[in-house]
Image: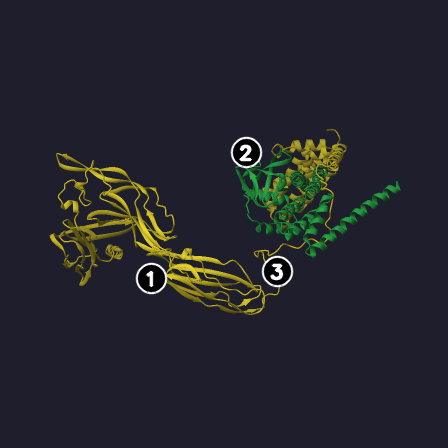
Chain colours: A yellow, B green
Amino acid sequence: MIRILSTLLMLSLSLIASAATFRVQAPRQVIAGNTFQITYVLENADGEGFKQPDVPNCKLLYGPATSRSQSVSIVNGKRSSTSSIGYTFTYRAEKQGTVTVGSAKIVVDGKTLTTSAIKLEILPPDRSASSGSQQSVQAYDVNTQTSGKPIGSDEVFVRVVLSKPTVYEQEGVLSTMKLYSKYQISKFQALELPTYNDFLAEEVPVTLNGSFENYNGENYYVYVLKQVVLFPQKSGVLEVSSGTYELSVVQFDIINTAFGRMRTPVDRSLKIKSNSTKLNVKPLPSPRPADFIGAVGTGFKISSKLNNKAIRTNEASTLTLQLSGSGNLKSLSAPRYQFPSQFDLYDPQTKIDAKPSGNFLTGTVNVDYTFVPQSVGKFTIGGGTCSYFNVKTGKYESIPFEGKTVDVAKGSSSSTVKFGSEPMRDILPVFKGDLELSRSASIVLGSWYNWVYYLLLTLAFASVLFIYRKTVKERANVTLMKRKGANRVAGKRLKRAKMFMNKGKKEAFYEEMLTALWGYFSDKLSIPVSELNRDNISRELLDYGMTEDGVNRIIRILDECEFSRYARPADSEMPMADVYSQACDAIGEVESTKRPNKK
Amino acid sequence: MKRYIFLFAMILVSVAVFAQSAENRAIKAYDNKNYEEAINIYDSIVQSGNVSSRLFYNLGNAYYRAGDNGKAVWNYERALKLNPRNTEARENLEFVKTKLTERILPEENIIVVFFQELQDLMSPNGWAVTGMVAFALFIIGFATYSFCSGLGMRKLGFFGGIVMLLLCIFANVMSSKAGKRMTEMRYAIVLNDSTTLSTVSHHPTSTAEEAFSLHAGAKLEKLDSAKLDTETWYKVRTEDRREAWVDGSAIGHI
């Protein structure tokens, strides 16, 4: 039993264990003269025959250093474990340049796993560092980033990088805003966002990832803050500004203690002024073709499609023109079709679906022409040509878009039928009948007869109430109402009792009979059921004007019911039918007794 | 006595005949696309004091055909004021509004709109009569409660009576509101294009620097009025809730 369980446990564990992976961890950029590490990590397996690749331009200082780690996690009751072995090599970068580090190999269970090759950029060392000046700050050396050092404008700044220095009007250019810093950035906030006057800007989403970059002989941490594709709206020398920013950088306090030098990070905030870059915008060559649609870019194409299979009179059909390509898709004017005059036209609807890519917006512009033919026949929707400016060739290019021939069939004849959504084309006709003119509107509310009506009705009713006040009082008297209703209520109960009798349910019958009788006397004599007993029933009934004989009969029926309810069938002296008819008679007798007028 | 009655009847008939023939002449002029004449005839009927929702509707149509959208809107509004259930007038008003130079969209509160529509279900007199009938039913219900012996009937009379009393109160409130709307001259329509409104806060001036202009067809709510020289100026609120003063000659009262 235990063995089975442990097997199951092992099975479940092995199911959860992940597959073996082999990967490389290395920096993307290093600076010549600095040491760096490359680690090859094998996960969830034991390997043998590890072979590392050569790293050009670098000298192996130490390695491999092997490290092992194991982690177990239980999530929602599921246990998973990861083990990993790391082979770490320490190199020193010797010569600048971009090198490719090949794949490392390892054999796991007879299979060879390889890592993917990586590119490593070796940047030249800082010019200032090589000149031997001790004061200069180096991005890769924390020891130089001591607090109290003034932060120069060449140490933290924002730059605008344009993908091209010269463009045509309406031609897109990718503008990248980069933050260069010798220090690590701890906080960052835009005080004033860049404004793009004279441009149409299309934002490209960016992720804020830091990397090293060598700029003007110095190495910096570089963050891409913002990327936009800009479409200049006029020619000339235009300026692209970077905006102003507030940020905090990290400097280190170096304290000499008994245990050696300690570094404490210190935040230092500073403001960065706006930088700007000039962009030279050339006007589009003249003369422009007459059918120029304002599109500047490459690879524009036009296709068109009729969305309805059958075209009928008085039914809306749609012709869609699709313009696809790369360029200023958001600021061009779509080409126009020539529709025959027998067609009613709606305003064309334009849908733009474009994403920034490189220097352009790439995507499609869909223009829906909705038309309603008014007569039957063969019609031609005239096409034509349109032209755009190709920035690659620097010339205007013409694209034809063909017309469509449509057969219009007869649609629903009810051209006068108005749909809820269909807009009115004209006002409704004048009213030709009697205009029912009147001098002034007579208002009923507040007029004398309105008041008289309410007054009279109220008075009439009040007087009727007054005259018949005795009747009303009687009706309003709850006790009296109950007394009058007693017979009816009892009647209902007796009916139910009769039902039980017919079914032969003795106990239920007697219970119902008792409830009916007690309830009846309670209502009739205005005594609560809880206070009712034989004595006060007979007394009140005599008062009520009944004969002694009658009262005795009633008491006997009550006794009979109470006795028979718990007695065995054989014991009952009277059959149920007799009890029932006697009770009915008794109630009838009480009802027929005239109440003495004494109270 | 007999003679007077005869004379009175004669006058009534002649007025009716005059109005009848004027209506026909207006329709004829309208059909012949002679809209100016139709406007003149309808205007003379309005001047005579005899009005109706349908008359203003036809006048609005004639103004629209003649190209005066501001006055068309004004007359449709007047037609709707007399009879909020004049659906043709409402549809034409909506249509003409789409042709206006500018269109201010009023801020609409859904509850207010609901009560407005409820109020428009009946004319003020319709509501008043409803109230009267409801009151009679309330009396009947109360009588049933007082005089009937059956418990069911009494309950019906009691609760039915209460419902009817509430309905009576509600109908009278509605009647009062609808009647107020019909008789009050609370609103106005701008008749001329590019009418200048002065936005000086306390008094109107014709040469105010602080001013904005409205186009024909804009609806205004009148708040106050003041005499300036010989002209009456009105303090108004536009549908987008700006307050300003406007010259009385540039607006048509509803």
Is A523 in front, or is A341?
Answer: A341
Per the image, the residue denoted by label 3 is A417
Q: Nearer the viewer, mark 1 or mark 3?
A: 1
Is A186 in front, or is A139?
Answer: A139
Q: Check chain identity for marks 1 and 3: say if they share one.
A: yes
Per the image, the residue denoted by label 1 is A392
Quadrant of image for the C terminus of chain A: top right
The image position of residue A436, as x and y in percent, is: 73, 48
Protein chain holding label 1: A
Per the image, the residue denoted by label 2 is B201
Asked if residue A528 can be seen in this view, the reply is yes
Dot 1: few (<14), some (14–19), or many (≥20) neighbours within 10 Å?
few
Mark 1 residue element: loop
Is B108 in front, or is A379?
Answer: A379
* Real-space CA distance between mark 2 and mark 1, rounded to the nearest whole angstrom: 61 Å
Quadrant of image for the N terminus of chain A: bottom left
Say if B163 sits above or below A329 in the image.
above
Dot 3: few (<14), some (14–19), or many (≥20) neighbours within 10 Å?
few
